Amino acid sequence: MKSYKKSVLIGGILGILIDAIIAFMTGDIDNVLIKAGLFLSIINFIIPLAINNAKAVGVLVLTISVIMLYISGRDGIVGFLLFLPGGIAALRYNEEKDKEKKRRKAFAILLDILDRVDTIYGWNERLHKLHHVLKRYEDDLPYDVRNRIDSVANATDIQNLRYYLLSQAPNPRKQSHKVAKIIGATLGVIVLISGIAFAAPSLWHGPQTQTCPDGSVIDASATCPNPTPPVG
C-alpha cells in the first residue's frame, strides 16, 4: 500500500475513534454537527480505498477536512489535524520517488544481510529469509539485482553483489532517518493531545454552564430566554 494511503487510513481510524469517544464522554452523540463530522471522517477514510489518483485523493481529503472543521467547529479539529498529514502527503506524492525510496530500502535490507555472511553456506542459510523480507519490494528491485541474488554460487559472488549494490545506490542506509521519525512522532502526539484538549475541554473541567437571570442553568453556548413581562 502506498505511503499516503496509509497516512490517510491511519488518520481516519484515529479520527473516527477519537471523535466517537469525545461525543460519548461529552454527551453530544445526538448532536447533528457531531454526526456530520463522523460521517465526513468515514468518507475521508473511504476515499484512498476507492481512488488511485494521489492528487485527487489529496484534494478531496483536505477539502472534506476543512468542511468538517467548519461544520463541527472545535469538535472537528481533531479529525482535521489527523487527516491533514495524509492529505498533504497525497498532494506531494511522486510515484517515481516512491519507487526509488523502496528500491533503496530493499538495497539496505540486502546489504545488511550481506554484511553478516562471508561464505556460501551462510548465504544459503539466509536466502529463504532474504526472499521473504524482500517479497514486498519484489516489483521495485531491478531485474539484474534479482538475477544476481539467484546466481550467487560462492564467496566471490557475495562480494561482487555487495559492490554492485553500492555502485547502484551509494549509502542506501542513509534513508532511514530515525531521529526525524522520532521527532515527527513526538510532534504528532503533541498535536493530537492539544487537539483533544481543545475539542473537549469538558473532559477536564466539566460541563460549561451559565446561570440566567431567572435562575435557570443552561449550557454556556446557549442564550438565556427573554424574561416574560408581567401581565396587566
Image: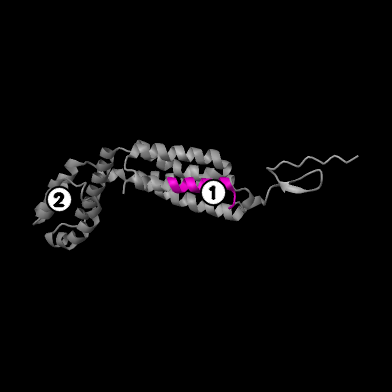
Magenta-colored segment: predominant secondary structure: helix
The residue tagged with tag 1: helix, strand or loop? helix
C-alpha span from label 2 to label 1? 51 Å
Q: Which mark is residue 159?
A: none
Q: Is residue 3 magenta?
A: no
Answer left or right for 179 relative to 141.
Answer: right
Viewer-proximal residue among 209 and 224:
224
Whether residue 38 is visible here, answered yes or no, is yes
Q: Which mark is residue 146?
A: 2
Residue shown at 14% from the left, 53% from the top:
149
Expressed as whole percent of the image width and height from the top left, the position of residue 17 reads 49, 53
Whether residue 177 is visible here, answered yes or no, is no
Q: Which residue is mark 1?
A: 35
Q: Is residue 31 magenta?
A: yes
Does residue 13 sit above or below 51 in this rendering?
A: below
Expressed as whole percent of the image width and height from the top left, the position of residue 121 reads 13, 62
Q: Are marks 2 and 1 in contact (CB under 8 Å)?
A: no
Q: Residues within 10 Å of mark 2 (few under 14, many from 20)?
A: few
Residue shown at 40% from the left, 36% from the top:
59
Does residue 65 sit above or below 9 in this rendering?
A: above
Q: Amino acid at mark 1?
A: Lys
- Name, please, the residue furthest toward the right: 232
Q: Quadrant of residue 104?
A: top left
Expressed as whole percent of the image width and height from the top left, the position of residue 204 reads 63, 52
- Name, please, the residue furthest toward the front: 232
Going from N to C along the chain, the mark reached first, 2 or 1, is: 1
Segment colored magenta: 29-43
Viewer-proximal residue among 160 and 6:
6
Answer left or right for 174 relative to 14.
Answer: left
Q: Residues within 10 Å of mark 1 (few under 14, many from 20)?
A: some
Answer left or right for 107 relative to 75.
Answer: left
